[in-house]
Amino acid sequence: MPTCILFLVSLAATSHLTAQDNGQIQTELIAEVRIDAVRGPVPKPARFVAATLVSQGQVVYYTVRIRNVSSEYAHDVIVTQRIPANTVYVKDSASGPGADVFFSIDGGQTFVPADELATTDASGVRRPVPLDQYTHIRWHLRNPISPGGVALARFRAIFQ
């Protein structure tokens, strides 16, 4: 199985921010892979490590750290994250406490819930959009983030 290097990134520049445009919010994308438990004389539990070296087909666990860097509550926070290159989103893996999650298949121009992403084939049958066509994920936080507070949004993707 080929192995490729995937970089640990801080992608504030690729995250679209709405309520954050005033500088209240900073985001950081953290990429990790799971190392399974090791059995033996000294067993080791499963753990997550930085995704610096990833094999084709391996699941990458992404966390978007959303931090309020201001001294005021951040309301109506919307964070958009591009799905990293060379990965395919894992169905139903995007989550965030108290967040509504939306997806884009057009490069981040429009967003809808996953169940509304459908195409009509030549025979007129409506089918879900293939996961490899997802380009962006958007989280709309329903609750404000306190001064200095952090919210976490997560998703998984398979490295291609």
Image (spheres, grey):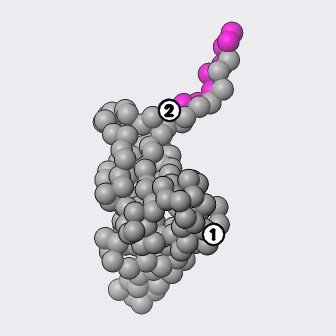
User: What mark, if any, has residue 49 been given in the picture?
Assistant: 2
What's under tag 2, amino acid-wise? Val
Neighbor class of circle 1 (other Cα within 10 Å; few <14, some 14-19, many 20+) is some
Q: Which residues are magenta?
A: 35-42
Q: Is residue 98 magenta?
A: no
Question: Could you classify mark 2 by the number of other residues whose Cα lies within 10 Å: few (under 14), some (14-19), or many (20 or more)?
Answer: few
Q: Nearer the viewer, mark 1 or mark 2?
A: 1
Percent x, y of residue 40:
66, 13
SS class of the residue under badge 1?
loop
Using the image as rendered, state which of residue 57 and residue 124 is in the foreground.
Answer: 57
Q: Earlier in the sequence, mark 1 or mark 2?
A: 2
From the top left corner, tell me how far across and down residue 120 is, in percent: 41, 85
Residue farthest to the bottom, as pictured: 124
Q: Residue sitting at 41 percent across and 81 percent down?
A: 119
Which residue does the numbered mark 1 point to in the structure image?
143
Query: Which residue type does callout 1 highlight?
Result: Asn
Residue 112 appears left or right of 141: left
Counting from the top left corner in percent of width and height, residue 51 is at 42, 37
